[in-house]
Image: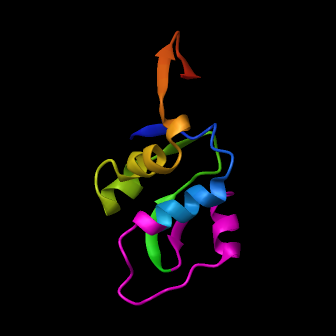
Amino acid sequence: MTRISIAHIQNKVELARRLWEYAKPAPVDCELTEEELEEATSKYTIHLGLRLVKIDISKDDADTYLYDKINGNGTFKLVVDTYFPNYARYKRSHNQIELL
């Protein structure tokens, strides 16, 4: 299990959208609704707009294992580092995660 802090990402709807964009495409063309994105920020989500994502971004940290297993190792972190760079630079100090 790999966990990544997403505590400082204010716009989790945008995070859900970016994770959807990086997910492997569905066999058929699909649309993504704002309702689906909003819903994805509050519970474990398996599919977004027919794409398999398997994410839970409702908390301050996310388990990236299933998303990465489907979409490539390190893809979840790549999305966070690319679109939310200020939130991806953390260091461990006395068992606390601090924003650099």
- Numbered label tally: 0
26 in magenta:
yes
Q: Is residue 66 visible?
A: yes
Task: State the residue at coordinates (39%, 55%).
Answer: 66
Q: State which region is magenta.
A: 21-49
Compared with 91, 77 (above or below) is: below
Q: Foreground: 23 or 42? A: 23
| 96 sits left or right of 2 in the view | right
In the rendered image, the vertical position of residue 33 relative to residue 99, given as above or below? below
For residue 44, say whether it is visible.
Answer: no
Quarter of the image for residue 72 reads bottom left
Q: Vertically, is 75 above or below 39?
A: above
Whether residue 49 sits left or right of residue 58 in the image: it is left
Against 49, is 15 above or below? above
**Horizontally, is 38 left or right of 89 in the view?**
right
- The colour scheme used here is rainbow
Judge by depth and name the residue closer to the eye, 25 or 100.
100
Q: Nearer the viewer, residue 13 or 48?
A: 13
Q: Position of residue 58 (x, y in %)?
A: 65, 50
Compare residues 94 and 66 and report the one nearer the observer: 94
In percent of width and height, residue 95 lies at 52, 15
Q: Residue furthest top?
A: 94
Image point 43% across, 89% down: which residue? 29
| Quadrant, the C terminus | top right
Residue at image position (53%, 79%) is 49
**Split into 4 quadrants, where in the image is the N terminus?**
top left
The residue drawn where x is 48% and y is 38% is: 4
Q: Is residue 27 found inside the magenta-colored segment of the image? A: yes
Outermost residue, bottom side: 28
